[in-house]
Image: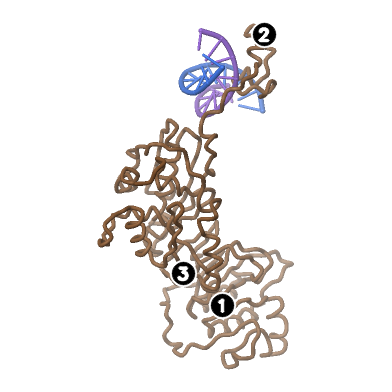
Chain colours: A brown, B purple, C blue
Amino acid sequence: HICIFRVKDLDLFVKKRVIRSFSLTDWKQLSKVFFCFCFHRRSEEEVDMDKVTAAMVLTSLSTSPLVRSPPVRVSEGLSGSWKDNGSAGPFTPSSNSSSGGYWSWSAPSDQSNPSTPSPPLSADSFKPFRVPSLGGVGPGPAGPEDPILDEQDGSSLLFDEPIPRKRKNSMKVMFKCLWKNCGKVLSTAAGIQRHIRTIHLGRNCDSDLSDGEEDFYYTEIKLNTDSVADGLSSLSPASPSVLSPPPPPPSPLPSVSQLPDSHKPTQPSDTKEPHAGGTTPLSRSAPSALYLIHTDHAYQVMKTYVNNNSAGSASTSFTPTNSSSFSISWQSPPVTFTGTTVSPSKSQGFGDQRSQTIAVLSSPPRATAALSRKVRGEGKKCRKVYGMENRDMWCTACRWKKACQRFTD
DNA sequence: TATGCCGGGGT
DNA sequence: ACCCCGGCATA
């Protein structure tokens, strides 16, 4: 669980033993009023956070808006020298911030003016702010200051129990064009929209009006500004396995009339595209495997897969509901979406619907050859060998009209 | 038309 | 899991 709450509430939680232990990572973008803790219950014999120690941590944190990595290990730092030797420990008080160690911070000049307001929150009403089951990137109301979780190693976490994702030191939200062989990364949504609108959609460049179609062609990415080069290199179009799945065979754009109006694109995109090959930009930018996407792009993925599967007699169904789940599936070839989102009623107070996180699980793009029905085996099968009159001699698969198991090709 | 077998339904 | 079959693709 990853939760955000006020420091003073954490004290309450510790006292009430809501929290057995906790760890914290470098949530330096959080204000001093709120801290994000990754905590988890552990077995009895494992390290148990001492209440006093926790209070000391809280005391330190309450004056520290900035926590630098690597974070302190509780077992070493708190129960160790700091606790026993007084101030000579990993926690460097703000009045002695130059003494080094794991922690350092600069006391804010205006502590009476926290940047983050304090909503009512108490131990009794304590609820996790967010529980990203897949390490989900679920932007909350905090906007850019929202903690961003990524795939970094868990070595800097306080406990050895891995926590899937943690926040990086300095993450920056960028916007990446999903147009194949483009991969342009811009820092603003407006910028990437303009890029897509003018470069790829061929629309009037002097108009900033958008019908929203650009949303389908870019995605948010998180870059560590400490290693932007790494992030960019890994996101370059030269990594087709990650961002440029193999294009599907040419296929007409399927009808999306089954889709509800609210999920329709403004208009079919490939009818005005200059690109050869007959593939649509969406299909060429088809993501694969597991995605965490925002509702902004949910339809992009769906539309993509509808496109990809248009070669078959696709009977597409998309069943959005007002509840907390949706599913999309079609018959040929077999691909199934499942996804969940948080309904507005269940995420009250946590931002608008556009910023909610959706997990989409899909099958990976199939090879072109696999798109067509498997070619019938050439060799003789049970039916041919034994004849209809000796059907009992057939292998079971043949009897069941399945692929012959006895005479495989 | 015969054959192979996928997808799906029934028990 | 086992069994059956409609229906499609192909030889």
For the residues bearing labels 3 and 1, Cβ distance under 8 angstroms: no
Label 3 – label 2 distance at C-alpha: 70 Å
Q: CA distance from mark 1 to mark 2?
A: 79 Å
Label 1 with label 2: CB-CB less than 8 Å: no
Residue assigned mark 1: A11
Front-most of residues A292 and B9: A292
Determine whether A362 is above or below A111 in the image.
Answer: above
**Front-most of A282 and A160?**
A282
Q: Are marks 3 and 2 on the same chain?
A: yes
* Chain of the residue on which disc 2 is drawn: A
**Residue under label 3:** A146
Please name the residue shown 42% across and 77% down the image. Answer: A116
- Three-letter residue code for mark 3: Asp
**Residue drawn at 71 percent across, 80 percent down:** A79
Q: Is residue A95 above or below residue A381?
A: below
First along the sequence among labels 3 and 1 = 1
Which element is circle 2 on? helix
The answer to whether dots 1 and 2 both sit on one chain is yes
Q: What amino acid is found at the position of numbered circle 2 in the picture? A: Asn
Q: Quadrant of the C terminus of chain A?
A: top right
Q: Residue at x 56, y 81 (%)?
A: A61
Drawn side of residue A143 relative to residue A17, left or right: left
First-in-chain label (3 vs 2): 3
